[in-house]
Amino acid sequence: MDIDGRLHEAGHLWRENQGPALRAPKLVTSPKKALPGWWRRGLIPLAASLAVAGMLIGVVSLHETASSSRRVPTGSVSTSSSVNFPPPKPTASTSPRPSNTVTAPHPSSTVALPPTAAAASPTRVVDVRPVDASGHLAAGYLVQQVAPGACSPGSEVATSAYRCDGTANHVVYDPCWAEGSPAKSVLCLSSSWSTTPTRLTLSGTLTALPPPGPAVVPWGLQLANGLMCTVFQGAHDQFNGRIVDYYCGNLYTGPVVLRGIDLSRPIWLAQTATHAGGRYTMGPTVSVATARYAKS
Protein backbone atom coordinates (compact mmCIF):
# COMPACT_ATOMS: atom_id res chain seq x y z
CA MET A 1 0.00 0.00 0.00
CA ASP A 2 1.38 3.43 -0.94
CA ILE A 3 1.37 6.59 1.14
CA ASP A 4 -1.75 8.06 -0.51
CA GLY A 5 -3.77 4.99 0.29
CA ARG A 6 -2.67 5.09 3.91
CA LEU A 7 -3.62 8.75 4.23
CA HIS A 8 -6.97 8.12 2.66
CA GLU A 9 -7.69 5.25 5.03
CA ALA A 10 -6.59 7.28 8.06
CA GLY A 11 -8.91 10.11 7.07
CA HIS A 12 -11.75 7.72 6.61
CA LEU A 13 -11.29 6.26 10.11
CA TRP A 14 -11.16 9.75 11.62
CA ARG A 15 -14.41 10.70 10.02
CA GLU A 16 -16.16 7.62 11.40
CA ASN A 17 -15.08 8.52 14.91
CA GLN A 18 -16.47 12.09 14.58
CA GLY A 19 -20.11 11.22 14.12
CA PRO A 20 -22.66 10.95 11.30
CA ALA A 21 -22.25 14.50 10.06
CA LEU A 22 -18.69 13.94 9.14
CA ARG A 23 -18.92 10.36 7.89
CA ALA A 24 -17.62 10.04 4.40
CA PRO A 25 -19.15 7.77 1.81
CA LYS A 26 -17.50 4.46 1.21
CA LEU A 27 -15.13 4.22 -1.64
CA VAL A 28 -16.61 2.85 -4.83
CA THR A 29 -13.25 1.28 -5.88
CA SER A 30 -11.74 -1.18 -3.55
CA PRO A 31 -8.28 -0.27 -2.27
CA LYS A 32 -5.23 -2.27 -3.35
CA LYS A 33 -4.61 -5.36 -1.31
CA ALA A 34 -1.71 -4.90 1.08
CA LEU A 35 1.23 -7.32 0.94
CA PRO A 36 1.78 -9.48 3.98
CA GLY A 37 4.02 -8.01 6.65
CA TRP A 38 6.71 -10.69 6.43
CA TRP A 39 7.17 -10.04 2.71
CA ARG A 40 7.55 -6.32 3.26
CA ARG A 41 10.14 -6.91 5.94
CA GLY A 42 12.23 -9.16 3.60
CA LEU A 43 11.84 -7.06 0.47
CA ILE A 44 13.88 -4.07 1.62
CA PRO A 45 17.08 -6.04 2.57
CA LEU A 46 16.83 -8.07 -0.62
CA ALA A 47 16.63 -4.94 -2.75
CA ALA A 48 19.61 -3.47 -0.93
CA SER A 49 21.65 -6.67 -1.48
CA LEU A 50 20.83 -6.69 -5.17
CA ALA A 51 21.90 -3.07 -5.49
CA VAL A 52 25.24 -3.75 -3.79
CA ALA A 53 25.81 -6.84 -5.96
CA GLY A 54 25.11 -4.83 -9.09
CA MET A 55 27.63 -2.20 -8.08
CA LEU A 56 30.29 -4.88 -7.44
CA ILE A 57 29.66 -6.53 -10.80
CA GLY A 58 30.05 -3.19 -12.53
CA VAL A 59 33.35 -2.45 -10.80
CA VAL A 60 34.75 -5.92 -11.62
CA SER A 61 33.69 -5.60 -15.27
CA LEU A 62 35.42 -2.26 -15.59
CA HIS A 63 38.61 -3.67 -14.03
CA GLU A 64 38.66 -6.70 -16.37
CA THR A 65 38.14 -4.48 -19.38
CA ALA A 66 41.05 -2.24 -18.40
CA SER A 67 43.32 -5.21 -17.64
CA SER A 68 42.59 -6.98 -20.91
CA SER A 69 43.62 -3.94 -22.89
CA ARG A 70 47.11 -4.10 -21.30
CA ARG A 71 47.61 -7.91 -21.23
CA VAL A 72 50.68 -9.34 -23.06
CA PRO A 73 51.36 -12.93 -24.15
CA THR A 74 52.88 -15.29 -21.64
CA GLY A 75 56.66 -15.51 -21.82
CA SER A 76 57.26 -12.05 -23.31
CA VAL A 77 58.09 -8.74 -21.70
CA SER A 78 55.96 -5.71 -22.33
CA THR A 79 57.97 -2.65 -23.20
CA SER A 80 54.96 -0.40 -23.85
CA SER A 81 53.87 2.26 -21.42
CA SER A 82 50.39 3.76 -20.95
CA VAL A 83 51.22 6.03 -23.87
CA ASN A 84 52.45 4.28 -27.01
CA PHE A 85 55.58 6.32 -27.69
CA PRO A 86 58.21 4.68 -29.94
CA PRO A 87 61.18 3.20 -27.99
CA PRO A 88 64.25 5.46 -27.82
CA LYS A 89 67.06 4.74 -30.26
CA PRO A 90 70.36 3.58 -28.70
CA THR A 91 72.98 6.26 -28.29
CA ALA A 92 76.55 6.28 -27.05
CA SER A 93 75.26 6.35 -23.46
CA THR A 94 72.19 4.16 -23.98
CA SER A 95 72.63 0.56 -25.03
CA PRO A 96 69.79 -1.39 -26.65
CA ARG A 97 67.78 -3.63 -24.37
CA PRO A 98 68.81 -7.27 -24.53
CA SER A 99 66.27 -9.74 -25.82
CA ASN A 100 64.76 -12.22 -23.36
CA THR A 101 64.69 -14.92 -26.01
CA VAL A 102 67.90 -16.94 -26.47
CA THR A 103 68.01 -19.31 -29.43
CA ALA A 104 70.32 -22.26 -28.79
CA PRO A 105 72.37 -23.31 -31.86
CA HIS A 106 71.67 -26.72 -33.31
CA PRO A 107 74.50 -29.21 -32.73
CA SER A 108 76.69 -29.63 -35.80
CA SER A 109 77.60 -33.06 -37.12
CA THR A 110 80.90 -31.71 -38.44
CA VAL A 111 83.76 -29.97 -36.75
CA ALA A 112 84.93 -26.68 -38.27
CA LEU A 113 88.45 -27.03 -39.36
CA PRO A 114 91.04 -24.26 -39.36
CA PRO A 115 91.84 -22.64 -42.70
CA THR A 116 94.31 -24.48 -44.90
CA ALA A 117 97.87 -23.37 -44.28
CA ALA A 118 99.94 -21.82 -47.05
CA ALA A 119 101.48 -24.27 -49.52
CA ALA A 120 104.72 -25.89 -48.35
CA SER A 121 107.92 -24.28 -49.57
CA PRO A 122 109.80 -25.97 -52.42
CA THR A 123 112.42 -28.50 -51.45
CA ARG A 124 115.50 -26.65 -50.23
CA VAL A 125 118.91 -27.74 -51.58
CA VAL A 126 121.89 -27.32 -49.25
CA ASP A 127 125.59 -27.84 -50.15
CA VAL A 128 127.74 -29.30 -47.39
CA ARG A 129 131.50 -28.66 -47.29
CA PRO A 130 133.63 -28.41 -44.11
CA VAL A 131 136.43 -26.44 -45.82
CA ASP A 132 136.32 -22.95 -47.27
CA ALA A 133 137.56 -21.78 -50.70
CA SER A 134 141.17 -21.74 -49.53
CA GLY A 135 140.93 -25.27 -48.15
CA HIS A 136 140.90 -24.36 -44.45
CA LEU A 137 138.35 -25.33 -41.80
CA ALA A 138 135.11 -23.51 -42.58
CA ALA A 139 133.24 -21.37 -40.10
CA GLY A 140 130.71 -23.30 -38.00
CA TYR A 141 132.78 -26.51 -37.89
CA LEU A 142 134.90 -27.79 -35.02
CA VAL A 143 137.40 -30.67 -35.19
CA GLN A 144 136.88 -33.04 -32.26
CA GLN A 145 138.97 -36.06 -33.32
CA VAL A 146 142.32 -36.50 -35.03
CA ALA A 147 143.53 -39.85 -36.35
CA PRO A 148 145.99 -41.15 -38.96
CA GLY A 149 144.58 -42.19 -42.31
CA ALA A 150 145.12 -42.92 -45.98
CA CYS A 151 142.88 -41.74 -48.84
CA SER A 152 142.10 -42.48 -52.47
CA PRO A 153 140.21 -40.37 -55.02
CA GLY A 154 136.52 -41.05 -55.43
CA SER A 155 133.40 -40.91 -53.27
CA GLU A 156 129.96 -42.51 -53.29
CA VAL A 157 128.21 -39.32 -52.22
CA ALA A 158 130.22 -36.51 -53.83
CA THR A 159 131.17 -35.81 -57.43
CA SER A 160 134.76 -35.03 -56.47
CA ALA A 161 136.02 -35.99 -52.99
CA TYR A 162 138.12 -38.61 -51.21
CA ARG A 163 137.33 -41.91 -49.64
CA CYS A 164 139.65 -42.59 -46.71
CA ASP A 165 140.47 -45.30 -44.19
CA GLY A 166 141.45 -44.76 -40.62
CA THR A 167 144.72 -46.68 -40.27
CA ALA A 168 144.39 -46.91 -36.48
CA ASN A 169 140.66 -47.51 -36.01
CA HIS A 170 139.89 -49.15 -39.37
CA VAL A 171 136.90 -46.89 -39.98
CA VAL A 172 135.91 -45.91 -43.53
CA TYR A 173 135.34 -42.18 -43.99
CA ASP A 174 133.44 -40.92 -47.01
CA PRO A 175 133.39 -38.12 -48.05
CA CYS A 176 136.61 -36.34 -47.07
CA TRP A 177 137.98 -32.97 -48.26
CA ALA A 178 141.63 -31.97 -48.61
CA GLU A 179 142.74 -29.47 -45.97
CA GLY A 180 145.31 -26.88 -47.09
CA SER A 181 147.62 -26.89 -50.06
CA PRO A 182 149.63 -28.96 -50.34
CA ALA A 183 147.30 -31.01 -48.19
CA LYS A 184 148.79 -32.81 -45.22
CA SER A 185 145.37 -33.82 -43.85
CA VAL A 186 141.73 -34.27 -44.79
CA LEU A 187 138.48 -33.36 -43.03
CA CYS A 188 135.77 -36.05 -42.99
CA LEU A 189 132.12 -35.84 -41.89
CA SER A 190 130.09 -38.78 -40.59
CA SER A 191 126.78 -37.35 -41.88
CA SER A 192 125.47 -34.37 -43.76
CA TRP A 193 124.20 -32.83 -40.47
CA SER A 194 127.47 -33.17 -38.58
CA THR A 195 129.48 -30.06 -37.72
CA THR A 196 132.31 -31.92 -35.98
CA PRO A 197 134.61 -33.35 -38.68
CA THR A 198 137.37 -35.87 -38.03
CA ARG A 199 140.83 -34.82 -39.18
CA LEU A 200 142.86 -37.61 -40.72
CA THR A 201 146.58 -36.88 -40.92
CA LEU A 202 148.31 -38.28 -44.00
CA SER A 203 151.65 -40.05 -44.17
CA GLY A 204 152.04 -39.27 -47.86
CA THR A 205 150.83 -36.97 -50.57
CA LEU A 206 147.24 -36.95 -51.75
CA THR A 207 146.53 -38.10 -55.26
CA ALA A 208 144.94 -35.35 -57.34
CA LEU A 209 141.23 -35.64 -57.87
CA PRO A 210 139.83 -36.24 -61.36
CA PRO A 211 137.29 -33.81 -62.86
CA PRO A 212 133.90 -33.97 -61.19
CA GLY A 213 131.88 -37.01 -62.21
CA PRO A 214 128.16 -37.31 -62.92
CA ALA A 215 125.66 -35.96 -60.46
CA VAL A 216 125.05 -38.14 -57.44
CA VAL A 217 122.02 -38.55 -55.18
CA PRO A 218 121.66 -36.27 -52.15
CA TRP A 219 123.82 -37.28 -49.22
CA GLY A 220 121.02 -36.60 -46.75
CA LEU A 221 117.26 -35.97 -46.81
CA GLN A 222 115.07 -34.25 -44.28
CA LEU A 223 111.48 -35.31 -44.88
CA ALA A 224 108.43 -33.18 -44.19
CA ASN A 225 107.43 -35.53 -41.35
CA GLY A 226 110.69 -34.76 -39.55
CA LEU A 227 112.67 -37.88 -40.46
CA MET A 228 116.36 -37.32 -41.21
CA CYS A 229 117.70 -39.90 -43.65
CA THR A 230 121.26 -40.73 -44.78
CA VAL A 231 122.20 -42.45 -48.02
CA PHE A 232 123.36 -46.09 -47.84
CA GLN A 233 126.99 -46.80 -48.84
CA GLY A 234 128.17 -50.18 -49.99
CA ALA A 235 125.65 -53.00 -50.52
CA HIS A 236 121.95 -52.07 -50.85
CA ASP A 237 118.75 -53.97 -50.08
CA GLN A 238 115.86 -54.19 -52.49
CA PHE A 239 112.12 -54.07 -51.87
CA ASN A 240 109.28 -54.35 -54.32
CA GLY A 241 111.67 -54.06 -57.26
CA ARG A 242 113.32 -50.86 -55.95
CA ILE A 243 116.69 -50.27 -54.29
CA VAL A 244 116.69 -49.13 -50.67
CA ASP A 245 118.72 -45.90 -50.87
CA TYR A 246 118.35 -44.17 -47.47
CA TYR A 247 117.98 -45.22 -43.86
CA CYS A 248 116.16 -42.91 -41.43
CA GLY A 249 117.08 -43.21 -37.79
CA ASN A 250 118.32 -46.66 -36.88
CA LEU A 251 120.31 -48.31 -39.66
CA TYR A 252 118.50 -51.68 -39.48
CA THR A 253 115.10 -51.08 -37.86
CA GLY A 254 114.09 -47.55 -38.87
CA PRO A 255 112.12 -46.37 -41.91
CA VAL A 256 113.83 -46.26 -45.28
CA VAL A 257 113.50 -44.32 -48.55
CA LEU A 258 113.41 -46.20 -51.83
CA ARG A 259 115.38 -45.16 -54.91
CA GLY A 260 113.59 -42.96 -57.40
CA ILE A 261 112.91 -39.62 -55.68
CA ASP A 262 110.44 -37.61 -57.77
CA LEU A 263 112.32 -34.42 -58.75
CA SER A 264 109.80 -33.30 -61.39
CA ARG A 265 108.12 -30.70 -59.22
CA PRO A 266 109.27 -27.98 -56.80
CA ILE A 267 108.42 -30.16 -53.82
CA TRP A 268 110.23 -33.49 -54.18
CA LEU A 269 108.46 -36.70 -53.23
CA ALA A 270 110.05 -39.78 -51.67
CA GLN A 271 108.56 -43.25 -51.29
CA THR A 272 109.14 -44.65 -47.79
CA ALA A 273 109.01 -48.17 -46.37
CA THR A 274 109.39 -49.68 -42.92
CA HIS A 275 111.66 -52.50 -41.88
CA ALA A 276 110.75 -54.89 -39.06
CA GLY A 277 111.17 -58.60 -38.44
CA GLY A 278 113.51 -58.99 -41.40
CA ARG A 279 111.02 -57.74 -43.98
CA TYR A 280 109.92 -54.45 -45.51
CA THR A 281 106.43 -52.95 -45.64
CA MET A 282 105.47 -50.13 -47.99
CA GLY A 283 105.01 -46.78 -46.26
CA PRO A 284 103.55 -43.43 -47.34
CA THR A 285 104.89 -41.08 -49.97
CA VAL A 286 106.41 -38.10 -48.12
CA SER A 287 107.54 -34.72 -49.43
CA VAL A 288 111.19 -33.76 -49.02
CA ALA A 289 111.82 -30.58 -47.02
CA THR A 290 115.61 -30.39 -47.49
CA ALA A 291 118.13 -32.22 -49.68
CA ARG A 292 121.76 -32.02 -48.55
CA TYR A 293 124.55 -32.58 -51.09
CA ALA A 294 128.24 -33.18 -50.47
CA LYS A 295 129.82 -30.28 -52.33
CA SER A 296 133.13 -30.95 -54.04
Image (spheres, grey):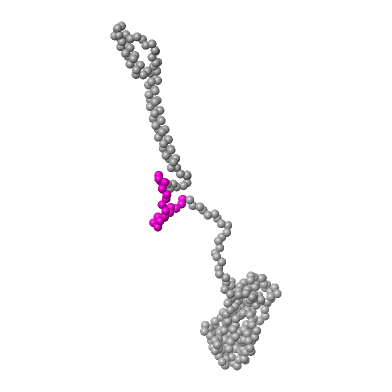
**Corner quadrant of residue 17:** top left
Among the 4 quarters of the image, the one containing residue 213: bottom right
In the displayed structure, 125 sits above or below 88; it is below
Residue 73 horizontal/vertical position (percent) = 47, 44
Q: Is residue 218 left or right of residue 105?
A: right
Quick one: quadrant of the N terminus? top left
Instruction: Determine the residue positioned at 59% across, 71% down.
Output: 225
> Who's the residue at 46% across and 44% down the image?
72
Q: Nearer the viewer, residue 267 or 195?
A: 267
The residue nearer to you, when weighing 259 against 102, is 102
Q: Is residue 254 magenta?
A: no
Residue at image position (63%, 79%) is: 231
- Quadrant occupied by the C terminus: bottom right
On the image, the x and y values in percent for residue 292 come to 59, 79
Camera-side residue: 230 or 215? 215
Magenta stretch in the rendered image:
81-100
Instruction: Please give left or right for residue 45 compared with residue 174 in the image.
Output: left
As for residue 90 lying within the magenta part, the answer is: yes
With respect to residue 145, does 284 lie above or below?
above
